Image: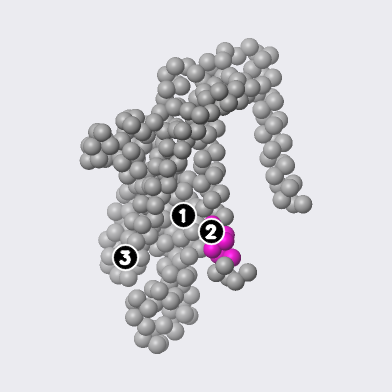
């Protein structure tokens, strides 16, 4: 019952906001190129559905590839440096530097490295750079969060680093790693779209390309329809990761 209430409340709020938007556009006679009413956006969603769906699928696929790269590199690097304090101290500032460096600043360099005809590879690389830090930070924090009493017990029995990693730290790190993955999934979508903007279209014509195309032609309803698809993609990927994480933790706890 509570879940139904939690779902109904936001839906009612969205319906109310859409109604206010529709009425305001019609009463104030707002030009459609400036702000089309929701009914025009809905029409654009239907009429441009095949094109927008194809672009959304392309953006989603590139975001998934970026997320996979971020998991392999971020998770692998976190595990590797957790075995050596000096390595962790050396790598952590570089990881933070990757996080705080704007993607638009490194995009031209990545595009050159990937090749001007390989826009897709550049987009995946740039989106992976955005999604890298949440995975790295989540896994590393989790590895450092093992129970101190169990750490002392492993010391007492003379456990090696690999034994400690496999039997104690990796299981302790799982919830943190899954939370990092959930954050990274949203970052991957955002990174893919920004990367498409800054790397140019090439053969990649994802949602960013549709946003640019619609904006340049003042087709605001189509632009908003592409944003709806983009929000849906982010919610879908976040939901998939959240459900997967919940099932993994449930199985782990034996419930």
Q: Tell me what residue is drawn at x 49 percent, y 18 percent.
A: 219
User: Residue 7 or 87: which is nearer the viewer?
Assistant: 7
Report the disc number at residue 50. Answer: none
- On the image, the x and y values in percent for residue 173 come to 46, 66
- Residue 147 in the image: above or below residue 183: below
Report the disc number at residue 181. Answer: 1
Mark 1 Cα within 10 Å, few/some/many (few <14, many 20+)?
Answer: many
Tell me the quarter of the image containing the C terminus: bottom right
Q: Tell me what residue is drawn at x 39 percent, y 55 percent.
A: 71
What kind of secondary structure does the magenta stretch mostly adopt? helix
Contact flag, marks 3 and 1 (Cβ < 8 Å): no
Q: Secondary structure at mark 2?
A: helix
Q: Would residue 64 appear left or right of 96 to someone viewing this image?
A: right
Q: Secondary structure at mark 3?
A: helix
Q: Tell me what residue is drawn at x 71 percent, y 30 percent.
A: 16
Contact flag, marks 2 and 1 (Cβ < 8 Å): yes
Start and end of the magenta stretch?
Answer: 244-250
Q: To which residue does mark 2 refer?
A: 245
Q: Tell me what residue is drawn at x 56 percent, y 19 percent.
A: 35
Mark 3 Cα within 10 Å, few/some/many (few <14, many 20+)?
Answer: some
Q: Is residue 4 visible?
A: yes
Q: To which residue does mark 3 refer?
A: 81
Residue closest to the far bottom: 157
- On the image, the x and y values in percent for residue 181 come to 46, 54
Q: CA distance from mark 3 to mark 2?
A: 24 Å
Indicate whether residue 186 is drawn in magenta.
no
In which image quadrant can residue 216 be found? top left
């Amino acid at each position: 019952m509570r879940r139904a209430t939690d779902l109904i409340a936001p839906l009612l709020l969205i319906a109310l906001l859409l109604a206010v938007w529709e009425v305001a556009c019609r009463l104030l006679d707002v030009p459609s190129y400036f702000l089309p009413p929701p009914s025009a956006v809905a029409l654009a969603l239907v009429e441009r559905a095949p094109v927008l769906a194809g672009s959304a699928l392309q953006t989603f696929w590139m975001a998934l590839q970026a997320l996979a790269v971020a998991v392999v590199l971020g998770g692998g690097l976190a595990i590797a440096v957790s075995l050596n304090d000096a390595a962790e101290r050396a790598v952590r500032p570089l990881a933070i530097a990757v996080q705080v460096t704007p993607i638009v600043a490194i995009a031209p360099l990545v595009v050159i490295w990937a090749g001007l005809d390989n826009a897709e590879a550049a987009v995946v690389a740039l989106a992976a750079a955005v999604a890298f830090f949440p995975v790295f930070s989540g896994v590393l924090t989790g590895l450092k969060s093992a129970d101190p009493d169990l750490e002392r017990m492993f010391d007492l029995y003379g456990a090696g680093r690999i034994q400690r990693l496999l039997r104690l730290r990796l299981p302790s790190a799982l919830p943190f790693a899954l939370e990092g993955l959930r954050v990274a999934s949203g970052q991957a979508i955002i990174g893919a779209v920004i990367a498409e903007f800054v790397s140019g279209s090439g053969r990649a014509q994802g949602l960013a390309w549709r946003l640019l195309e619609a904006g340049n032609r003042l087709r605001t309803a189509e632009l908003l329809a592409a944003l709806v698809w983009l929000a849906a993609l982010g919610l879908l990927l976040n939901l998939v990761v959240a459900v997967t994480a919940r099932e993994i933790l449930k199985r782990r706890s034996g419930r």
